[in-house]
Every structure is written in C-alpha cells, then in structure tokens.
Image (cartoon, rainbow, N blue to C red):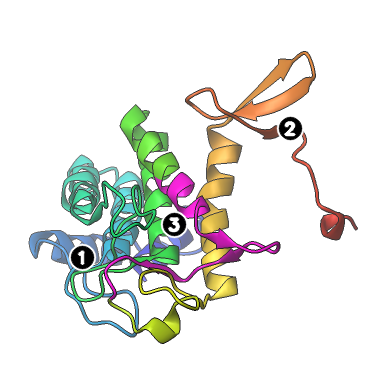
Amino acid sequence: AVQFLVDATAAGLVDARDEIRSAVDAFVSAGGFFGSTNTDTEDPKENVSYAIAFETLLAAGELLDDQATVDAAYELCLRPLTRFELVRDLNGQRTKGLLFMEDAWNAACTWETAQVSHAYLVAYGDTGHRPYVLKALTILRAMALHHHGPFGFLTEAVDWDGHSPTLRHFPGERYGDIATTHPFLNNLQVVLPTVAFLERFARAVKVDDGEFLFDVEGNRLCSMPPPAADWMTP
C-alpha cells in the first residue's frame, strides 16, 4: 500500500505525503515488519519481505527528501538479507548463490529470490556500489541452473534439505528442484531483474562479428538486438 501511494504521489495523481510519512515512521520506529509476504507461511522474517520493504522505504525516502528514511532502507531492510544467503552447494544441490526463504520454510523459493535480486539492482542504481550488482547477478546465475526441459520449466523452489515430501520432487529425488511451478508468478518475477539489468546496466559493445551486450564483469550475454525464437516472431 505504501509503495502504491509513493508511486501515485510521484506521478502527480494524489498527494499522500502525510500518509506515507506516518506509515514510514511507524515502520521504522518499530524496527520493521518482515512477516511472510506469502499467504501460506507465517514466519516473522521472510527474505522477500525485506526486499519489498527496501524498495518501498528507498522510494519513500527519495519522495520525502528524507535521508534518514533512505538510510533505514539500507540498514534495516537490505543489509539483513545476508542472513538468508546460501553460500555453498548443499546435499549435492546447486544452491550456492540462492537464498532460503525463511526459517519455517527454508527452501530456496524462486519468485522470492528474484525479488531480492531486483532489490540489489535498485540499490546499485541508487549508489553505484559494485557489490550490489554482483549480488544480483550471482542470484540470477544461480536461478538459471534450475530450468528444466526444452521449454524452460522453472522450478517453484529448490528443496535442499528434504523439507518437502518426495512426491513434490522429480521422480527418484529426495532433494532438489520441486516438480511444480507457478508459470505466471515465477517466470515473470525472474524477467523483472533480468530485464532491469539488461536495460539499465548491461553494456552494448561492437566487436568484429557484431554488437553484443556484456555484463559488468565482461561476460558476453547476447547479440544486439537480442535473438528471437520462432514463437516470438509476429
């Protein structure tokens, strides 16, 4: 709701600065509220809630021209995301670079992780602090390892410790990618940070065999314009 009011005020549709100020003050003075954004879990600290709160507080601070709110966005919301990071592969699963969702449901869930990646890109765009964009790219690269089949089935989550019953896994697997997905939610959520990076931070470079997009580490991503599959042709 606060994010909506910030965007509506910035667009000149309404002046909700007083309401935004009141909500931000209540949030910050209480040390933040980071309970489950998901409707099916009830944990007091969920990674995606920190990411959404960061983007909201940052935008509110900029709208209100309030550095204290901007600082709170980084210290109260973005910095604690490191507690959710999976820094190595676990139980033979490709989990390095992903984030577990919450203590009560510790799978590395797809759309939530994508939202965290986008939050780091927002932080990079605001500060130019290189570690933020590297975190965002690390997450996207880790998520790219969990597509399946010729049509890019994107798993709902990576279950790295057997939290889910085996019926939710691919046949014969005790750990690993969940065999279900939410196509609209998962895939579009991954598109958000992917396109944000390509549009804002990738570099277009001309070389002998054409023009290509490169990431901030010099890795070639795709040709310009990006290639289109047959099904994408009008």
- Three-letter residue code for mark 2: Ser
- From the viewer's side, name the closer residue of 144 and 133: 144
Query: Which residue corresponds to the image point at 44% horizontal and 40% vertical from the top-left?
Result: 137
In the picture provided, is 109 more to the left or to the right than 152? left
Residue indicated by mark 2 = 223
Of residues 162 and 112, the one nearer the viewer is: 162
Q: Is residue 152 left or right of residue 190?
A: right
**Kind of residue indicated by mark 3:** Ala
Which residue position holds label 3?
114
Q: Which residues are magenta?
A: 139-162
Callout 3: SS: helix
Separation of marks 1 and 2 at Cα, in angstroms: 48 Å
Residue pushed farthest top?
A: 208
Residue sitting at 54 percent across and 76 percent down? 182
Question: Image quarter for residue 183?
Answer: bottom right
Element under disc 1: helix
Where residue 212 sits, quadrant-wise, is top right
The tag earlier along the polypeptide, 1 or 3, is: 1
Q: How far apart in space, not on screen, are marks 3 and 2 (Cα)?
A: 24 Å
In this rendering, does residue 25 appear at all? yes
- Residue that mark 1 sits on: 22
Q: Residue 146 at what x, y percent from top left?
A: 50, 59
Instruction: Name the residue rendered at 19%, 42% in the picture.
Output: 71
Circle 3 packing at 10 Å, graded few (<14), some (14-19), many (20+), is many
